[in-house]
Image: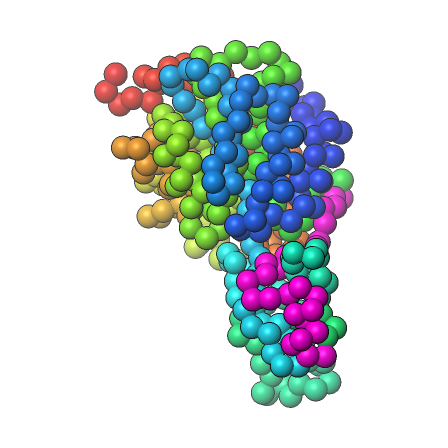
Amino acid sequence: MSKNKSILNKKSLDFLEKYLNNASPTGYEWKGQKIWMDYLKPYVDDFITDTYGTAVGVINPDKKYKVVIEGHADEISWYVNYISDNGLIYVIRNGGSDHQIAPSKVVNIHTKNGIVKGVFGWPAIHTRKNKEEETPKPNNIFIDCGCSNKKEVEELGVHVGCVITYPDEFHILNNNKFVCRALDNRMGGFMIAEVARLLHENKKELPFGLYITNSVQEEIGLRGAEMITQTIKPNVAIVTDVTHDTTTPMIDKKIEGDLELGKGPVIAYAPAVQQKLRDLIIETAENKKIPFQRSALSRATGTDTDAFAYSNGGVASALISLPLRYMHTTVEMVHREDVENVIKMIYETLLKIENEETFSYFK
């Protein structure tokens, strides 16, 4: 595979835009999963789905040895929690939604009647007293959908439990920065789908079963991965997620590490990361001249890697992360070259996995 030639074609980017622009909040991922599966269908032999919506494309389903490549499909959102008598809507988080970015954002409230538009309102600067000024908090932000009272809100189809997402859509800055909400971590689903496409187009035969896994409910505790690993019972898992670009203001590199957009995928060092698998990924990257960065994580990775690693008596697992700016906002940003290099890193590593003894300490 040429290191200079772009591996993303127009069809890939059209899929990425459609996939990102579709809302896929935690617990309601199925529409996004349908888009993902439709794109993946020509490149796999079969699909597995579970009752909560995790989707898995399978290559070589009859092979005994099983390798997972994984991303997660859900995005952070809000739930309607309370509707006041004067028609204002108060919310609770569905995942790690950032309350500080909410004021002045347009929102989509998902109801059985379709989308209801609203805005996170905030008192005008003229009416706020500097010394007494409140900051946005989960208990004081509110949504205004233009109604005068609770009854009007309910007549729109809005009720407690309706999920709320942001409508911000995909765009590209400076020709090489992908920007959108929910790059965390639908970029993972996109990248593993591209690995499947490349294997198919390059007519690569794998000596194992490959399970291209797009898990749900990562944002509320790795729940989708926890469920699907019990179904697949893999031998190996290569997980993708995002990590922080630490070069922007107000981030302490002594705490968060030194990571930057455009300098390559980030390979994790953590107890959940199996050393031989990580070493194979690093050796592959070095041999194929794929740039990469390193990150040391403490007790847990905080990603689906943990769910796979500690399941089924232990699964050899590794984490490859995509550097990202402005996580859990509506302007998450990644570098196109990093995206392509994650895809290359996974693709080339898969071609190096030979059999069930590859990662055994005791062979």
Q: On screen, 185 above or below 203?
A: below
Image quadrant containing the N terminus: top right
Residue closest to the eye, 321 or 261: 321
Image quadrant containing the C terminus: top left
Residue closest to the eye, 256 or 124: 124
Q: Say if the magenta span includes residue 252.
A: no
Residue 188, quarter of the rendered image: top right
Residue closest to the eye, 40 or 51: 51
Q: Residue at x 72, y 49 (%)?
A: 169
Picture coordinates of residue 103, whole percent (x, y): 66, 70
Residue closest to the eye, 89 or 353: 89
Which range is magenta? 148-174
For residue 219, say whether it is visible: yes
Residue 36, quarter of the rendered image: top right
Q: Residue at x 60, y 78 (%)?
A: 84
For residue 344, say whether it is visible: no
Image-based side of 115 in relation to 214, left or right = right
Picture coordinates of residue 199, whole percent (x, y): 58, 18
